[in-house]
Image (tube, rainbow, N blue to C red):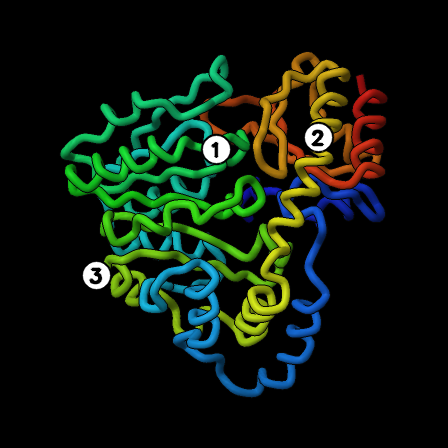
Amino acid sequence: MPVYTHGGDILTAQAAYGGAVLDFSANLNPLGMPAPVAQAVRQAADQCGRYPDPLCRDLRRAIAAHDSVGEEQVVCGNGAADLIFRLVFGLRPRKALVTAPTFSEYEQALACVGCQVARYALDQDRNFDLDRGILDAIGPDTDLVFLCTPNNPTGRLIDGALLLEIAGRCGAAGAVLAVDECFLPLAAGGPGLAPWLEEHPNLVLLRAFTKSYAMAGLRLGYCLTANEGLRETLGRFAQPWSVSTPAQAAGLAALTCCPNWAAEGRGFAEGARPGLAVGLAQAGCTVVPGQANYLLFRLPGVADLKEKLLERGILIRSCANYHGLGPDWYRVCVRGEVENRRLLAALREVQ
């Protein structure tokens, strides 16, 4: 079997530890999944004797109202990862641009179609912030650009004005710009780039319920674009009934019953993140000042930190597989004070 490198593999961790594990590896809303969403999923079980709505009509209508976009601009999928692969399979780009480090799934999808990948290196000395130099990396041979704000794993937001400048450059070059905003509701308020979709028909926004509503197991994501051709392409490369009945019910309940859940989770994370960052620094870590519900840090001189913490019942995310990082880089989500203290205590024990 292929090696699983993402966070959230709790079953493997529990098997290795031999019991319950405290998971810091998955970056979900620290408030957990809202009760109305769980209730909607239970009620939807009675409807699973028939196929789900293939067009996600009610869900798309609710997303459009929530995100202030046209209903026709919404394409739903089996998680944001599903839409990433559908976009790549549909476009079959010859050359794509990504940052380094960033979410590995972009390159994994691009590799499936034999795409040449150019990486724009982010500078640790500048907290891995994206700068205007990326504009020069977008040339006439660039077919697709993936960006992530806040970036995963750095937790740093991309300046909005720069994003619009990049969108303009991509449009002039004939490139599609895919901006992953899955963590944005937990890192910043506001509509993201949605208000500029009509102005930039080459723009695709990736969003998900996974992080904002802590419903990773239900697999529900969506993208927004004003480009009818791109929407048709995404539809052609979708498997039939890609969004299950329980997932559609969960998304609808999330938006109608708990529209402020992400904002509440963001407030919680903003209150807990500084203390966690200080504790990591006091333990000898170099901490990137994240702006999301997770923190990236480096701890040189301690081999196999992930394994040593797992021996104490705590799972963190190794960032060794990210381009531009290395085996002494790690990522942890922001949790409650009690859980964060347990992580920091374990971290002191293993040094």
Sequence-wise, which precedes: disc 3 or disc 2? 3
Sequence-wise, which precedes: disc 1 or disc 2? 1
The amino acid marked with disc number 2 is Lys
Label 2 near label 1: C-beta < 8 Å? no
**Residue 40 drawn above or below residue 137:** below
What's the distance in space between the residues labelled 1 and 2, CA to CA?
26 Å
Residue underneath mark 2: 306
**Residue 8 drawn above or below residue 64:** above
Q: Nearer the viewer, residue 218 or 28?
A: 28
| Secondary structure type for disc 1 | loop
Q: Nearer the viewer, residue 41 or 257?
A: 257
For the point 42% across and 32% down, which residue is it? 158
**Residue 91 drawn above or below residue 133:** below
Residue 279 lies, in percent from the top left, at 76, 22
**Residue 64 drawn above or below residue 185:** below
**Label of residue 157 in the image:** 1
Snapshot quadrant of residue 242? bottom left
What's the distance in space between the residues labelled 3 and 1, CA to CA?
29 Å
Snapshot quadrant of residue 332? top right
The amino acid marked with disc number 3 is Gly
